[in-house]
Structures are given as C-alpha cells and as structure tokens.
Image: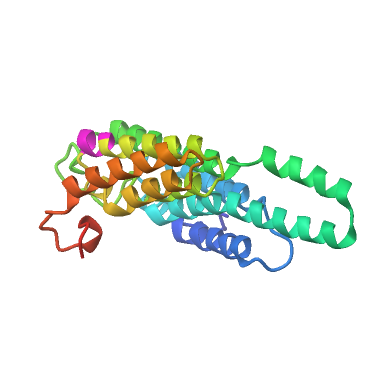
C-alpha cells in the first residue's frame, strides 16, 4: 500500500475496493461469492487498524458511515442469498432426481440460517465500541467537540440509525422467525438508548427502523403474538413521529 513517494491508500481507496466486492456479491451472476462479506470486513479491519495506529488523528484513514455500511449491507444480504441458492439447488436436484444430495444441502443451509444477521450485529457492536474508544482517546463529547474546542463533527467514527436499520433488515430476512423479531426489537431499543445517551443526531430513530421491526414480527411464525407486537410498535412509532414537525420525511410517519 505504501510507495516510495509516501503515497498510501486512504479510506476512499478501501471503500472503492469494498464496493466492487459488494457488487460482485449481489450480482447473482454465476456462483455466489459467499466469502466476499468476510473479505470486505478484513479490508475494513485493516483500515481501522491503520486509523487506530495513527492515534485516531489521520482523517484520510477514518472509516465513514458508508464504509461500515458496505460491510453491514453485505452481511445483511447473505441469508437471503443463501436461501436463493438453496432454492436453486433444490430445483436442480429435483430435475436430476438426486434426492439424497438435495437433503444434504437442506441440512447444510438450515444450519447457516441467521449467519449473515449474526455477523451484521457483531459488526454493529464493533462500530459502537470503536466510537467509544475514539471518543475517549480524543476527548470528544457527544456534540462532537474536542478538548481544544474545535469541531470534529465529521471526522470521527460513530454509528448511525441506518446501521441499525440494515442490521434489523438482516434479522428480518434471516428466516429465524420469533428469534429474529426479538433481535430486531432489542436493536431498536439499543438504538433509542444510544441516541439518548450520546445525543448523536445520526442515531435519531426514524420510522424506517420501526418499519423493519414491524416487518420482522409480521414474518414471524406465531401469528397472534406477532400481530400484537406489530400493533404495539405501530402505536409507539405514531407517538414518536406522527406529530413531528421535521421536514425530513424519514422522521415523520405520515408523509
């Protein structure tokens, strides 16, 4: 990465490579590159390590919300792509009458249900931990002010509500039923708690987050319980957003 002229890859270089992996992963052309999310995370970890080694001071190495979001989005899509692969494998096995092989694939794929969602949540926790470490290291308060009084608003790691939305999407599409809905509910509560404790504007819960959690309960197996949870969440979202005067449609329930 380092040349004799002192030129080194920056956050944008890493992000471009990760985006290329993401496009390949989501393309659906040929074999799925199921290791691409892990490869993208390895690149992100390398970037984060360089940023930490700089004492969190080299802004050119500071991962952005988009950089983290790329890895989260890849993990979020993993379970859906695995299920699509399973369906294709079942169809091919039916055509070839290879029932035994089909059964083996079903067992193998069921074992991996939720793999993408679990990894997405793990990466989200990593982001939150990194944000806290950087804040302590640089003496940054919740408003984005450093000890010296200058604003570092755009130059430090912090989670955002979209990271939570993406992770909830991962669980909602994981095929894990009630467990997935409960994980989404927990993540929604964690988002609200972090917003209240940090004051980060980027963490302000929005109706997209509530919508994903409602969707997760709607997809759960226990219909009566799921309907009750979905209705409760709708009431909670209405109380928070229906009468909001924000001009941002994402912050209003009625548009």
Indicate the position of residue 90 as horizontal and vertical percent values: 77, 55
The foreground one among 155 and 32 is 32
The foreground one among 87 and 161 is 87
Residue 247 vs 36, above or below: the answer is: below
* 82 relative to 10 in the view: left or right: right
Q: Is residue 204 visible?
A: no
Point 87% across, 50% down: residue: 99
Point 43% across, 35% down: residue: 182
Q: Is residue 135 visible?
A: yes
The foreground one among 68 and 141 is 68
Say if the magenta span includes residue 196: yes
Point 62% across, 55% down: residue: 81
Indicate the position of residue 245 as horizontal and vertical percent values: 10, 58
Which quadrant holds residue 87? Answer: bottom right
Residue 247 vs 146, above or below: the answer is: below
Number of residue marks:
0
* 95 relative to 232 in the view: left or right: right
Residue 132 vs 98, above or below: the answer is: above
Indicate the position of residue 214 as horizontal and vertical percent values: 37, 47
Quadrant assignment for the N terminus: bottom right
Quadrant assignment for the C terminus: bottom left
Point 26% across, 34% down: residue: 193
* 147 relative to 9 in the view: left or right: left
Indicate the position of residue 76 as horizontal and vertical percent values: 52, 50
Question: Please, what is the dominant secondary structure of the magenta stretch?
Answer: helix
Q: Residue furthest front?
A: 224
Say if the magenta span includes residue 118: no
User: What span is colored magenta in the figure?
Assistant: 193-198
Which quadrant holds residue 42? Answer: top right
The foreground one among 68 and 14 is 68
Q: Which color scheme did the rendering employ for the protein?
A: rainbow
């Amino acid at each position: 990465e380092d040349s004799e002229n002192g030129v080194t890859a920056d956050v944008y270089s890493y992000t471009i490579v990760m985006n290329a992996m993401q496009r390949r992963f989501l393309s659906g052309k040929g074999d799925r590159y199921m290791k691409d999310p892990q490869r993208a995370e390895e690149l992100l970890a390398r970037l984060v390590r360089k940023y930490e080694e700089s004492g969190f001071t080299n802004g050119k190495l500071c991962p952005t919300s988009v950089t983290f979001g790329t890895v989260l989005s890849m993990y979020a899509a993993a379970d859906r792509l695995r299920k699509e692969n399973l369906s294709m494998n079942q169809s091919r096995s039916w055509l070839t009458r290879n029932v035994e092989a089909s059964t083996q694939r079903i067992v193998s794929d069921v074992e991996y249900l939720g793999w993408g969602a679990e990894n997405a949540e793990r990466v989200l926790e990593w982001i939150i931990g990194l944000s806290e470490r950087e804040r302590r290291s640089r003496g940054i308060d919740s408003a984005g002010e450093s000890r010296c009084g200058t604003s570092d608003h755009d130059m430090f790691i912090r989670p955002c509500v979209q990271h939570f939305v993406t992770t909830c999407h991962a669980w909602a599409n994981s095929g894990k039923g009630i467990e997935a809905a409960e994980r989404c509910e927990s993540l929604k509560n964690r988002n609200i708690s972090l917003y209240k404790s940090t004051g980060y504007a980027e963490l302000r819960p929005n109706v997209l987050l509530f919508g994903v959690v409602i969707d997760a309960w709607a997809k759960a197996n226990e219909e009566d319980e799921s309907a009750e949870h979905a209705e409760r969440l709708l009431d909670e979202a209405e109380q928070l957003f229906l009468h909001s005067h924000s001009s941002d449609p994402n912050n209003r329930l009625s548009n």
